[in-house]
Amino acid sequence: MDKPQAYPTGREHFICRWFRRGMLTAAAGLAVGLLPAYRLARLMRATVFGVSAAGPAVLLWVPLALTGAAALAIYIPARR
């Protein structure tokens, strides 16, 4: 009979742990960068005519796209 291990070892556990750590880092980066991005967007609105860079759609979709890109960038190498 095998001895029980203190930490689960397996491919799924490794991928899940690696993915969680990477997404926490990505979420922290998004949280820290959202306020400066909003401030810069309001500053740029004065320079770029007719473009609303601080609109709610932009502030919603850009973080979602970055989160999706981060998820792929974490998951693909962790899977190998």
Image (spheres, helix red, strand yellow):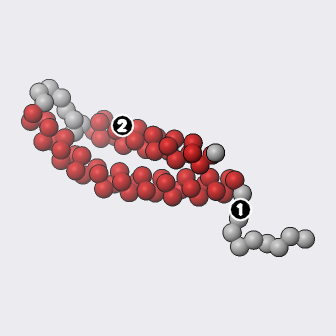
State which quarter of the image contains the C terminus.
top right
**Residue 36 vs residue 47: left or right?**
right
Q: For the point 90% across and 71% down, which residue is it?
A: 1
Foreground pick, 57 / 73:
73
Query: Residue 17, image x and y in percent?
Result: 59, 58
Give the amino acid at mark 2: Trp
Q: For the point 24% across and 46% down, which residue is it?
A: 37
Q: Residue furthest left?
A: 46
Q: CA distance from mark 2 to mark 1?
A: 37 Å
Q: Nearer the viewer, mark 2 or mark 1?
A: 1
Other-residue count near label 2 (Cα within 10 Å), few / some / many at <14 / 14–19 / ≥20: few
As drawn, the label of residue 61 is: 2
Query: Residue 29, image x and y in percent?
Result: 36, 54
**Residue 56 vs residue 25: left or right?**
left
Q: For the point 12% across and 42% down, which residue is it?
A: 43
Query: Residue 63, image x and y in percent?
Result: 36, 43
Query: Residue 71, image x and y in percent?
Result: 50, 44
Q: Which residue is mark 1?
A: 9
Dot 2 or dot 1: first in sequence order is 1
Residue 22 in view, yes or no: yes
| Label 1 SS | loop
Splitting the image into 4 quarters, where does residue 64 fall? Answer: top left
**Whether residue 21 is situated above or below residue 3 in the rendered picture:** above
As drawn, the label of residue 26 is: none
**Whether residue 74 is situated above or below residue 44 in the rendered picture:** below
Q: Residue furthest right?
A: 1
Splitting the image into 4 quarters, where does residue 50 fall? Answer: top left
Foreground pick, 78 / 68:
78
Q: For the point 43% across and 56% down, which residue is it?
A: 25
Foreground pick, 18 / 63:
18
